[in-house]
Image (cartoon, rainbow, N blue to C red):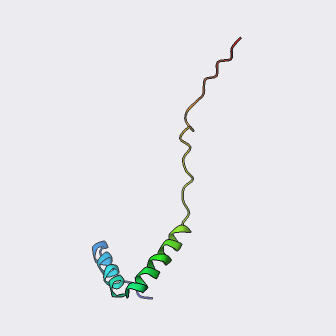
Amino acid sequence: MEIRFQTKEESNKQQQEDFLKLSKTERVYAFFRLMEQVSRFPIKNKEDKNKDNFLIVIKPK
C-alpha cells in the first residue's frame, strides 16, 4: 500500500489515467464492480415530506 499526498486535481487525473490504461472489457467490469460497491453504501432514510405537516379533521355534527 502506498500513501501519496496530492491535490484533488492530481488525484482525479491519476485515477483517470489508471482507468484509461485498462482494456475496454476491464473498464466495463470495473464499472460493474463500482456499481456493486455503491449499492452497499448506507443511505439516509428518505425524508417523509408530510412529517412537519399537520392534519385538521372537522367532524360533522
Q: Quadrant of the C terminus?
A: top right
Give the percent coordinates (x, y) of residue 8: 31, 72
At horizontal 64% and vertical 18% (from top left) the residue drawn is 58
Q: Give the side of residue 24 with respect to residue 46, left or right.
A: left
- The residue shown at (57%, 53%) is 45
Q: Of all residues shown, which one is farthest toward the right? A: 61
- On screen, residue 55 versus residue 1, left or right, reads right
* Residue 25 screen position, x and y as percent: 42, 85
52 relative to 4 in the view: left or right: right
Residue 52: quarter of image: top right
Quadrant in the picture for residue 39: bottom right
Counting the numbered discs, the total is 0
Query: Quarter holding the N terminus?
Result: bottom left
Q: Which x, y percent locates residue 10?
A: 28, 77
Residue positioned most to the front: 25
Residue 31, quarter of picture: bottom left
Q: Is residue 52 above or below residue 30?
A: above
**Vertical placement of residue 10 versus 58, above or below:** below
- Which residue is pictured at 38% across the width and 85% down the height? 24
Q: Is residue 22 above or below residue 45?
A: below
Q: Position of residue 3 (x, y in %)?
A: 40, 84
